[in-house]
Amino acid sequence: MENKKLLRTLLYTGIGCISLSAAITIAAPSFQGPSSVPQFHPLCLSILKDWSQDGGALDMQQCALTQSDVEVIKTPDGAYYAKRVNGEAGFMAYKPIGSLDESMELLLVYDKKNGNPITSIHFLGRIPGSALNRAFLTTIEKGGDRCLGGVSAARLISPSELEVDVNATVHQMLTFLTDSGSRDATSLSLKPNNYEAYACAGTITKTYNLISNKMNFSKVTFTRDESRKVIDKSSRCYDKVVAEQLSAPRVLDMAQYQDFLETYKQHCGNIR
């Protein structure tokens, strides 16, 4: 993630080529939920991702017209989906997260080419006064594939805070606090070795401060229990502890999570 100055500055300066007049008064920051995000054509996001690497921008409305013959499907969970064209395999899809100050949208993007879809969260910002009215400003979370660090969900909880739920395996659920770089939002990786669907053990929630560019872990949600031991026998002890020691909905804050680690060690031994 690139280093950002104050979010308010980004909201009005786009990619750095537009400046505010000193006479303009900036309103108090605001945020809205998923329904505030306008609809984009998913294939235009693929084009914009490529252009933004060179600092470029793209008129998303004009792009949507050029892609109008490609069907966009809204999935049951609220994502917008379109198959790739011109002989390319896979699809592009996105789920709206919310908007900031009516000038920047956040999207959870699913990018599938040959393998499974890779998830990421993007800011999509407007450039005031420009014919090219949108540009990617930054990527907040580069997730992975399913349990390989895939982003499960994301929410704006204030004008300056974004919560991101990241899928994790049993090993990651036990070790993410001690992983190298886990406190650094620019290098954090939640990519366990075993990423098959059955390996999902829960989600780790991170809270990003969009102004200071800082991240902290805020909660851990356990989604598997002893019923999964037939599939993943190597994690029987973990599953037994979750089933017997945690009551529904099995959502722990960080202090409670530390207590769970101690309980796990008492029943299963040291974490490897």
Image (spheres, grey):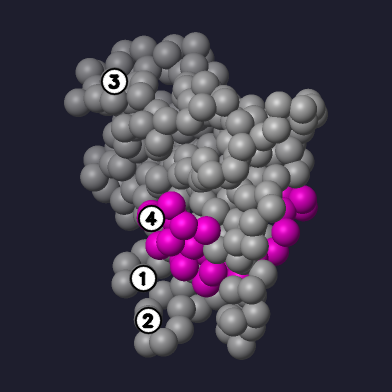
Q: Which residues are magenta?
A: 33-57
First in sequence, mark 4 or 3: give its number.
Answer: 4
Q: Is the N terminus in the top left, top right, bottom left or bottom right quadrant?
A: top left
Q: Mark 3 sits on what residue?
A: 178
Question: Would you say residue 10 is visible in this rendering?
Answer: yes
Picture coordinates of residue 143, whole percent (x, y):
40, 47
Please give the count of numbered marks on the rendered protein: 4
User: CB atoms at circles 1 and 2 under 8 Å apart?
Assistant: yes
Closer to us: mark 3 or mark 2? 2
Closer to us: mark 4 or mark 1? 4
Q: Which mark is residue 160?
A: none
What residue is at 47 percent from the left and 22 percent from the top?
214
Please state which amino acid type lies under the numbered disc 3.
Thr
Please state which amino acid type lies under the numbered disc 2.
Glu
Picture coordinates of residue 13, whole percent (x, y):
60, 40
Picture coordinates of residue 203, whole percent (x, y):
48, 37
What's the CA distance linking mark 1 and mark 3? Answer: 33 Å
Question: Would you say residue 246 is visible in this rendering?
Answer: no
First in sequence, mark 1 or 2: give its number.
Answer: 2
Q: Mark 2 sits on what residue?
A: 88
Task: Out of 53 and 201, give the one closest to the viewer.
Answer: 53
Q: Mark 4 sits on what residue?
A: 54
Quick one: SS at disc 3? Answer: loop
What residue is at 61 percent from the left and 88 percent from the top?
69
First in sequence, mark 2 or 4: give its number.
Answer: 4
Quick one: SS at disc 2? Answer: loop
First in sequence, mark 3 or 2: give its number.
Answer: 2
